Image (spheres, rainbow, N blue to C red):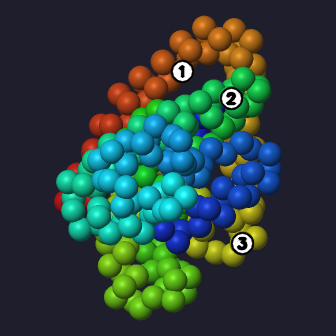
């Protein structure tokens, strides 16, 4: 099975691309959805959060009070680091099992929709990285329109994230969402065809003979780390000269 990482910046249209992929029958594992699921009442992650931050971050029904927790971690980098250390591993485990289920069902391609794919280093563990891109100015205008924010507010939010131009450096495939929805639909259709073609017949062999699939996955990931890291580093250096 070809595992593909999908990412982008805020207001670039990543969620729209994810929806279009699902419409084409491509299984999508959404990291944001899993991040909510792993902190549901009764989960180990919520128990760890409560043990560290106290019962004050819970609602009366025992669910996580995201606003209360956010108030604690927003201005405290150390507390935010603790929270990430609880939630991120739980999300990664959930993603692993979700991918495994799709593999077991015989999926040819599986897409991981991860906003922080690059920042979190998960790009190393996928066969292809797809970045949804639009120009920073279009990104800014869309964010202002979507949230009703001022230019200064939207700029501050964008500046707090890894610039989309840097994410593009890690891309194997770029979806340019600077145009219309129709333009985007054409690109997604082309992407689905390309991914299915690249999965080829090997996906069925790896499914029928799991050891072959595991060896192939290990080889792909190892080669990717060796090949991509110097490439990304050289691009960054070139961009600073």
Q: Which residue is at 49% across, 85% downward?
A: 144
How far apart, in angstroms, are the residues tagged by discs 2 and 3? Answer: 31 Å
Relative depth, front residue between 207 and 220: 207
Task: Determine which residue is flagged by label 1.
Answer: 217
Crowding at mark 3 (Cα within 10 Å: few <14, some 14-19, many 20+): few
Of mark 2 and mark 3, the one earlier in the sequence is 2
Give how far across and how far down residue 63 sits, in percent: 52, 56
Q: Name the residue at 56% across, 82% down.
A: 146
Other residues around mark 2 within 10 Å, as few (<14) / some (14–19) / many (≥20): few
- Mark 1 and mark 3 lie on one chain; the one further toward the N terminus is 3
Sequence-earlier tag: 2 or 1:
2
**Position of residue 184 in the picture relative to residue 11 (left or right):** right
**Is the residue under label 3 in contact with that under label 1 (CB below 8 Å)?**
no
Q: As drawn, is 99 to the left or to the right of 45?
A: right
Q: CA distance from mark 1 to mark 3?
A: 34 Å
Answer above or below: position of 101 versus 151: above
The Cα atoms of the two marked residues, 2 and 1, are separated by 16 Å
Which one is in front, 107 or 85?
85
The structure residue drawn at horizontal position 50% and vertical position 80%, both measured from the top left corner, is 143
Residue indicated by mark 3? 181
Q: Residue 95's x, y, as percent?
A: 55, 37
Dividing the image into 4 quarters, which one contains the C terminus?
Answer: bottom left
Whole-percent x, y for residue 100 in the image:
63, 27
Q: Is residue 91 left or right of residue 186?
A: left
Q: Is residue 191 left or right of residue 80?
A: right
Q: Secondary structure at mark 2?
A: helix
Q: Which mark is residue 101?
A: 2
């Amino acid at each position: 099975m070809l595992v593909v990482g999908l990412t982008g910046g805020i207001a670039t249209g990543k969620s729209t691309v994810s929806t279009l992929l699902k419409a084409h029958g491509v299984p999508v594992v959404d990291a944001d959805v899993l991040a909510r699921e792993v902190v549901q009442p009764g989960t180990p992650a919520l128990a760890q959060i409560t043990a560290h931050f106290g019962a004050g971050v819970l609602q009366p029904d025992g669910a996580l009070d995201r606003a209360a927790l956010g108030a604690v971690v927003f201005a405290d980098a150390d507390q935010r680091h603790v929270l990430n250390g609880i939630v991120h591993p739980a999300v990664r485990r959930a993603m692993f099992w979700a991918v495994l289920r799709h593999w077991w069902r015989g999926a040819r391609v599986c897409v991981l929709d991860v906003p922080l794919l690059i920042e979190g280093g998960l790009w190393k563990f996928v066969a292809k990285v797809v970045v949804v891109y639009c120009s920073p100015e279009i990104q800014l205008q869309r964010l202002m329109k979507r949230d009703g924010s001022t230019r200064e507010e939207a700029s501050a939010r964008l500046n707090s994230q890894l610039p989309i131009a840097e994410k593009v450096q890690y891309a194997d495939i770029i979806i340019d969402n600077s145009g219309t929805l129709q333009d985007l639909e054409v690109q997604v259709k082309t992407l689905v065809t390309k991914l299915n073609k690249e999965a080829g017949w090997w996906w069925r062999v790896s499914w029928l003979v799991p050891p072959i699939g595991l060896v192939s996955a290990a080889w792909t990931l190892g080669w990717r780390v060796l090949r991509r890291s110097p490439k990304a580093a050289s691009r960054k250096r070139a961009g600073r000269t």
